Image (tube, rainbow, N blue to C red):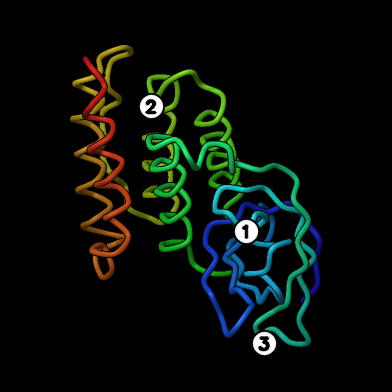
Amino acid sequence: MHFRAPALVCAALPHGENAVIARLLTADHGLVAAFVAGGRGRELRPVLIPGNTVEADVRSKSDTQLPFARLELLQSRAPWITEPLPAAAIGWVTALAASVLPERQPFPALYDALSGVLEAICVAPSARGWALGLLRYEVLTLRELGYGARIARPPEHDWPALLATFDAVGRELARYPLADRRRDVMAARVLLRERLARIEA
């Protein structure tokens, strides 16, 4: 296994003294877990922030071996990690991908959707500019994984209806792809929901 491609950092878990196991979403290779030497060091720690776009050079000697990855930063989401609402949204959408997508199975539509949502979160002046896109990403995730959720699209500019739809989609996520691990992952979504609720209708 050897490829070089743009990837979205979805998770970075400490491994050993200074390394990280990164979960990277690519368009053509799907979600890939890879060992990143020095991932907790001063140079690579800012690169491995969930939501960042990186150029990943991934290689392993066999398909059964955990691959090694070298990463170069292409786009940083770090400035938005200090803002409570964007940080909660970025944390949730990346955690969802890292938790529910099967490894090494391509989902190009989800890669594009996640890229678009992350970009919207970072450029829109408020959550009203990206909340509907985030919902679409969640619904697409359900559908790509084979869960045909029947979710009606909320009317434009109807914030209470959007929050009600957000709750409905959350129930579908908890019932299906996150049924066995929702306590850990859904906590990120609960935090996001609490912060969205503070926006006036």
Label 2 sits on a secondary structure element that is helix
Q: Quadrant of the C terminus?
A: top left
| Identity, as a three-letter code, of the amino acid under mark 1 | Leu
x 78%, y 87%: residue: 61
Q: Which residue is mark 1?
A: 48
Q: Secondary structure at mark 3?
A: loop
The residue that appears at 30% across and 47% down in the rendered structure is: 189
Query: Crowdedness of circle 3 by 10 Å Cα count: few (<14), some, many (20+)?
Result: few
Residue 122 position in % (x across, y down): 55, 30
Quarter holding residue 182: bottom left
Mark pair 1, 3: CA separation: 21 Å
N-terminal-most mark, 3 or 2: 3
Q: Earlier in the sequence, mark 1 or mark 3?
A: 1
Q: Residue at x 21, y 57 (%)?
A: 175
Q: Amino acid at mark 2?
A: Leu
Q: Residue flagged by tag 3: what amino acid is it?
A: Gln
Gap between marks 3 and 2 measured at Cα: 39 Å
Which residue was labeled with disc 3?
Answer: 65
Decide: few, some or many residues near mark 1? Use Cα within 10 Å; few <14, some 14-19, many ≥20.
many
Comparing labels 2 and 1, the label whose residue is closer to the camera: 1
- In depth, the one of 32 and 73 nearer the eye is 73
